[in-house]
Image (cartoon, rainbow, N blue to C red):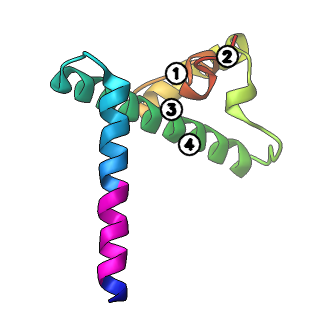
Amino acid sequence: MIDNKKEQERDELHRTIWNMANDLRGSVDGWDFKQYVLGMLFYRYISENFIKFVNAGELEAGNKDFDYAKLNDEDAEDAREDLVQSKRYFILPSQLLIHWGRV
């Protein structure tokens, strides 16, 4: 009985999430919307991964209060070459996903 109730609640949650996604995408084709969402998720992943990588290196170097996301772009540029060598990509702090939408 309890498993059936949990399954019903899960199914209702899935329907609600699906309906919200449909409302959000509006008249945009489902395939196009999926590509947009997957791209955003990927950018979120690489942004968060980059922050963790840089912060871990600074922590290891003894800089306990360092936060790459709070660094200004000019200071971050100093480390571009080394970060591209080690990570194969570089994101300026102002271009991190956590800053999108901020004015």
Which mark is on residue 53? Answer: 4
Decide whether residue 102 is among the magenta residues. no
Residue farthest to the right, as pictured: 65
Determine which quarter of the picture holds residue 37: top left
Residue at (34%, 35%) from the top-left corner?
A: 21
Instruction: For label 4, count other residues whose C-alpha is less than 10 Å away and answer few (under 14), some (14-19) or many (20+).
Output: some
Determine which quarter of the picture holds residue 19: top left
Which sits earlier in the primary sequence, circle 4 or circle 1? 4
The reply to whether the C-beta atoms of the residues labelled 3 and 1 are less than 8 Å apart is yes
Q: Amino acid at mark 3?
A: Ser
Q: Position of residue 97 (x, y in %)?
A: 54, 26
Segment tinted magenta in the rendering: 4-13
Which mark is on residue 30? Answer: none
- Nearer the observer: mark 4 or 3; the answer is 3
Decide whether residue 11 is among the magenta residues. yes
- Where disc 3 sits, the SS reads helix
CA distance separating discs 3 and 1? 7 Å
Q: What residue is disc 2 on?
A: 102
